[in-house]
Image (spheres, rainbow, N blue to C red):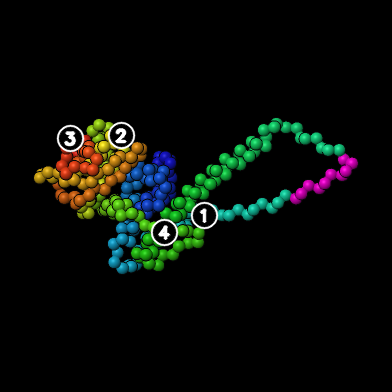
Amino acid sequence: MNYTELTPEERESLAAGYALNALDTDEIRTAEELLTRDPSFVALVRSFGAVTTALAEAPAPVVPSAGLRAGLLDAIAQTPQEAVAPAPAPAPAPAPAPASAPAAAPPAGPALSEPAVHSTRAVSSTGATRARGRRFRITWALAGLVAAAALVFGGVSLGRGVFAPTTGPEAGAQALNSLLAAGDLQRASTPVSGGGNATVVWSPEHGRAAIATSDLPTLASDRVLELWLIDGSGARAAGTFTPGASGTTWTLLEGDLKPGDSVGMTVEPRGGSQQPTTDPILVVATA
């Protein structure tokens, strides 16, 4: 999926699915590329992530605003549902030829005409299946959002043919969604020393930070990347990760982000280090 070719409706559905952890691998890669490159998409994820955050944190149901309820129901109403086509009636059997009639000669024509028809049908069927799958995933993501809103806000119903996911996001995805939904979210993008790019996002209000990396060089099997929260007294270990072979890798930093902290990254032995043992390949100030 190419993020530059998405329609506004597909972008909204992608943001909803990402907030609910309801995307396939290709869609996750597209969403994470957009998160590192497009602030407007970050805002979309924030808006959808706010619902999942409310679901996790709300102590009791509250009444939704009319705008939120109408917007959610309108999103489902506008999502195309696939109609089931009636099965074609069987063709009538040909009448038997009179016994005295000579056998009909085979019709003239190119020998490849029939396979060509089959090939066209196969391509058409494949395209329809892919489109149908996209629509069902979009509907599923939107339905999940409404289901979450129903649990938190009450009074929201699911339309016919809409199915909500049965499992919620993992803890790490929930924490990242909560961070991306922060009203004071800040971001900084920078090249990484040695190759690749990184975007650091952080929220002083939440006291959390995350990093998205892409196009990083392949590490030796006994090495990992380690993240650090750095202040005037030194560096605090904030977790390790191995970059993905392709696409964008998101990592939520461990520990609390304090005012004035910088985010750093080094290459360390597998298992991590208590203090940096190599020069940083990235340092981003959050002050």
Q: CA distance from mark 4 to mark 3?
A: 45 Å
Decide which of tag 2 and tag 4 comes sooner along the chain. Answer: 4
Mark closest to the chain's N terminus, 4 or 3: 4
Amino acid type, mark 2: Thr
Q: Secondary structure at mark 2?
A: loop
Q: Residue furthest right?
A: 100
The amino acid pointed to by label 1 is Gln
Q: Bin the neighbour count of mark 2 within 10 Å (Cα to Cα): few under 14, some 14-19, many 20 and up.
A: few
Report x, y in % for residue 46. 31, 52
First-in-chain label (2 vs 3): 2
Calculate the distance from the C-alpha at mark 1 to the C-alpha at mark 3. Answer: 55 Å
Q: Are marks 2 and 1 in contact (CB under 8 Å)?
A: no
Q: Which residue in the structure is indicated by mark 2?
A: 218
Question: Quick one: quadrant of the C terminus?
Answer: top left
Q: Residue at x 61, y 39 (%)?
A: 120
The correct choice, above or below, for 210 with respect to 222 in the image is below
Amino acid at circle 3: Asp
Number of the label disc, if any, that sits on residue 81? 1
Residue under numbered circle 3? 279
Q: Nearer the viewer, residue 203 or 193?
A: 193
Q: Secondary structure at mark 1?
A: loop
Magenta segment range?
92-101
Q: CA distance from mark 4 to mark 1?
A: 21 Å
The span from disc 2 to disc 4 (Cα, nearest Å) is 36 Å
Q: In screen coordinates, is 273 left or right of 18?
A: left
- Give the crowd class for mark 4: few <14, some 14-19, many >=20 residues within 10 Å: few
Q: Residues within 10 Å of mark 1 (few under 14, many from 20)?
A: some
Q: Amino acid at mark 4?
A: Thr
Q: Residue 18: horizontal and vertical position, in percent?
A: 37, 50
Q: Secondary structure at mark 3?
A: loop
Is residue 253 visible in the rendered structure shown here? Answer: yes
